[in-house]
Amino acid sequence: MPGPNTTMLIEGTFEELAEELAQYIDSLKKAHGDDSSNIQSECAALLKENKKDEVLKKLVMGSQALNQAPEKEFIAAYNLLIHLVRQSPNVGMFLPKICAHLSAPITSSPANGGGLALSILGTVFNTLPQDHHEMRYHILLTILRVIRATSNFETLRPQLKQLDAWLEDWEMEESDDRKLYLAVSDVAGDAGEDEQAYTYLLRALRTFSADEASSPEARELSLRALKSALTHPTHFDFQDLTDLDSIQALRNSEPIYFQLLEIFNSDLLDDYNDFKDEHEGWVEESGLDGAALNRKMRLLTLASIAASSGQTRSLPYSHISRALQIPSEDVEMWVIDVIRAGLVEGKLSQLNQTFLIHRSTYRVFGENQWREVASRLDMWRNSLQSVLQVIQSEKQRFMQEKEEEANRAEQKLEHAQRGMGRGGNKNRQQRPMIDDEMD
């Protein structure tokens, strides 16, 4: 897999190494019944004329035989081929064929062939100069094909965080970015990584310009993303879709799909049931999972009525039962499910048959929601003002008490000083009398 840049150290001249590899390819071919292979002698003749690129063509065309090499010799043989190819000023002429060979099955090691191929492709990717943008891009696509064919998604996962940086550095066309994003989405989808598959599918959709939003490719990918979002068991926010130009273009090209998206984006279960009545049998005909849609619509409906519960922040069981069209004995189960989905936080009061709401998620944040936020901010401001008034009042009372206490202390001190003054005068008057007596 791609990683830090690496350096290959292989000793020998181009002529010596080319002859060695040609001889090895001939031996592999003859071992598998191709006695006519004579790459070594053909390369020797070309080397005498110093036609190195022609030699490389012979070696690269014959390198498919390396897929039959014993597992312990496979990597060394391919590394030698890559080393020779990198010495040519026309590296890009040879790498596509090598990538094609590595995308084919490694017949000598069916169990470990995918890992061997990825090891070589990673070496090619990492030994190429950083400015070989187009070649690095195409090698990465080959790596993705091998990963998908060998169900080896875990080797890709650590590299995904570098993908955007690579694309930014390579400055490819948007169509090329889209191709790479779709390749990652396909790999993730095949591996059962539905969230990753959806994420990279959305990235692919964002590469369409406004002018391309109605193109057949954009329409196809938009429908794919819409179906994925609708049926994914943990995906409840559809704003990521409705913000895309290609999705908005479905309003004209696929009006029923777009109507369904709008219902899941902001409407309730009653609206969804009306949609099914209006388009009877359409859900099943479109290949969507009706049971999954019903469940998701109930959870979204419960989230909506929780968000609109107002200042009471509570929902009676009877209200939930009617809104979700379920028996009253199933209410608690659905409330637990909506809490697990992360759409609402709260607790059930079996005694009062009420769901007490601590936090709820708005499905669409529009004008009504801004009004509610403004109303709550006004309430908080009024509460804070009341608290501030109480604090100021207490502060004034405290300061007044401290002032009164200081005044009382000052008065006591004055009284004490006056008393001491009177006592001192008396003592001074008596002292001479005592002195006279002593005389």
Image (tube, helix red, strand yellow):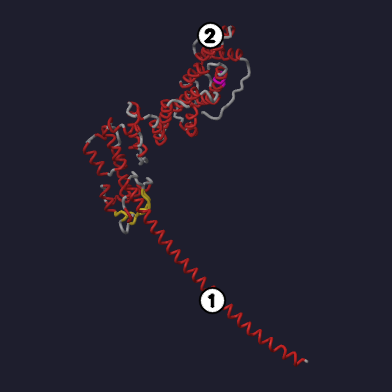
Q: Residue at x 73, y 90 (%)?
A: 434
Name the side, left or right, on which 6 lies relative to 244. Answer: right
User: Where's the C terminus, which quadrant?
Assistant: bottom right
Q: Is residue 297 magenta?
A: no
Residue 74, position as x, y percentages in the image: 54, 21
Give the image quarter of residue 419: bottom right
Label 2 vs label 1: CA separation?
A: 118 Å
Please tell me whether the stretch drawn in magenta is mainly helix, strand or loop: helix
- Viewer-side residue, 343 vs 413: 413
In this view, the residue farthest toward the bottom is: 437
Amino acid carrying mark 1 in the image: Arg
Foreground mark, 2 or 1? 1
Residue at disc 2, secondary structure: loop
Label for residue 408?
1
Name the side, left or right, on which 17 lies relative to 385. Answer: right
Q: How many marks?
A: 2
Residue segment shown in magenta? 76-80
Amino acid carrying mark 2 in the image: Asn
Q: Residue at x 56, y 27 (%)?
A: 5
Name the side, left or right, on which 138 lies relative to 274. Answer: right
Residue 295, position as x, y percentages in the image: 31, 42
Label for residue 112?
none
Q: Is residue 227 above or below residue 428?
A: above
Residue at disc 1, secondary structure: helix
Residue 433, position as x, y percentages in the image: 72, 91
Quickly name the residue at label 2. 38
Q: Residues within 10 Å of mark 2 (few under 14, many from 20)?
A: some
| Contact between labelled residues 1 and 2, with CB atoms less than 8 Å apart | no
